[in-house]
Image (spheres, rainbow, N blue to C red):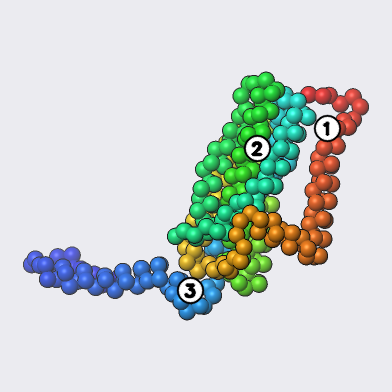
């Protein structure tokens, strides 16, 4: 601030000067609080001016996709290898456990979406779920890679429970977070930019963690001559991934928290209940463009799964079976 108090003046300042001089800071305090707490709300809600999202919200919102990217890559490329080869669970049981969790996830996604859409709170419809998922999903993801020394039956139950918990908890973050994107802005170009950042962070987070894991954690040691069978490496991966997922979710939630008051208001629903959710899903599938995208995505996922399974289903002759 430009004003200053002399270091020494030879006489006491007194309460009058103290009060009058200090009272000048009221102006800065009013300005600072107005800009921090009222300006966006006034122009975005009362006046109706669409606030620009900006690169900070783009990055913080998009960074949250790192959590899903890590989970998705872990389930796709590491989990079956870990439980079926390193832990020693019968591969058929490991695959069945993941199938059960995936089927459960198909039902939990629309339920969480419906719950979020109809939530009314001072933190809006999305942020309560995003905050609530952060710590539980990180804890469960770490525990997934630290299974106890149990029998196949008990390990199967453990994997089913942990996989369902992780998929459900990541749904509590990912579904409301995905729905938050079009509510941040109505501008087509800004939505495109936001989604681009989100896709980038999701891909980079999963791929980056995979490269780090294969390069620095799943390495040969005296106890594990074959790096891919390094059980300690998988446990360390789970712990590091859990911390990164926790940070990513919190950064995304906190980085968009100030936008809660300016989010687009939802349209009034004509129907309520889970039956309306099913009706909306069917209505979406009737859109020919979306249906084509839906079928192509399913075909791509099946092809990816078959590609990943081929080395384990048909190993080359003479290759070792661990």
Q: Name the residue rendered at 10%, 67% in the picture.
A: 14
Q: Name the residue rendered at 49%, 56% in the picture.
A: 254
Say which mark, if any, is on residue 312: 1
Percent of width and height locating residue 314: 88, 32
151 lies above or below 177: above
Q: CA distance from mark 1 to mark 2?
A: 22 Å
Quadrant location, the N terminus: bottom left
Secondary structure under badge 1? helix
76 lies above or below 8: above
Q: Name the residue rendered at 24%, 73% in the picture.
A: 24
Percent of width and height locating residue 156: 69, 28
Which mark is nearer the camera, 1 or 2? 2
Q: Residue 275 or 244: which is nearer the viewer?
A: 275
**Who comes first in sequence, dot 3 or dot 2?**
3
- Left or right of 144, for residue 286: right
Q: CA distance from mark 1 to mark 3?
A: 57 Å
7 lies above or below 236: below
- The residue carrying pointer 1 sits among few (fewer than 14), some (14 to 19) or many (20 or more) residues within 10 Å by Cα, namely few
- Left or right of 251, for residue 102: right
Q: Name the residue rendered at 84%, 35% in the picture.
A: 311
Secondary structure under badge 2? helix
- Left or right of 59, for residue 281: right
């Amino acid at each position: 601030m430009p004003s200053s108090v002399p270091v020494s003046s030879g006489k006491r300042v007194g309460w009058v000067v103290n009060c009058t001089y200090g009272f000048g800071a009221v102006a800065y305090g009013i300005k600072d609080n107005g800009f921090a707490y009222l300006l966006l709300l006034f122009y975005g809600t009362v006046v109706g001016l669409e606030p620009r999202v900006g690169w900070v919200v783009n990055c913080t919102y998009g960074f949250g996709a790192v959590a899903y990217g890590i989970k998705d890559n872990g389930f796709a490329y590491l989990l079956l290898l870990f439980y079926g080869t390193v832990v020693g669970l019968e591969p058929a049981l490991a695959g069945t456990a993941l199938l059960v969790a995936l089927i459960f996830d198909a039902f939990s996604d629309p339920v969480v979406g419906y719950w979020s859409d109809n939530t009314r709170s001072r933190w809006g419809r999305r942020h309560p779920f995003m905050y609530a998922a952060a710590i539980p999903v990180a804890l469960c993801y770490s525990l997934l890679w630290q299974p106890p020394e149990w029998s196949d039956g008990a390990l199967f139950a453990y994997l089913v429970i942990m996989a369902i918990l992780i998929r459900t908890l990541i749904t509590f973050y990912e579904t409301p977070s995905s729905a938050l994107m079009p509510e941040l802005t109505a501008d087509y170009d800004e939505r495109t930019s936001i989604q681009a950042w989100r896709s980038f962070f999701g891909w980079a987070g999963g791929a980056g963690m995979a490269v780090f894991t294969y390069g620095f954690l799943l390495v040969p040691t005296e106890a594990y001559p074959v790096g891919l069978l390094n059980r300690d490496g998988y446990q360390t991966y789970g712990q590091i991934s859990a911390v990164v997922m926790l940070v990513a979710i919190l950064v995304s939630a906190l980085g968009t928290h100030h936008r809660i008051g300016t989010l687009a208001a939802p349209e009034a629903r004509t129907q309520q209940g889970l039956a309306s959710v099913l009706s909306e899903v069917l209505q979406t599938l009737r859109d020919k463009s979306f249906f084509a995208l839906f079928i192509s995505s399913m075909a791509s996922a099946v092809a990816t799964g078959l590609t990943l399974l081929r080395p384990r289903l048909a190993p080359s002759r003479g290759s070792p079976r661990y």
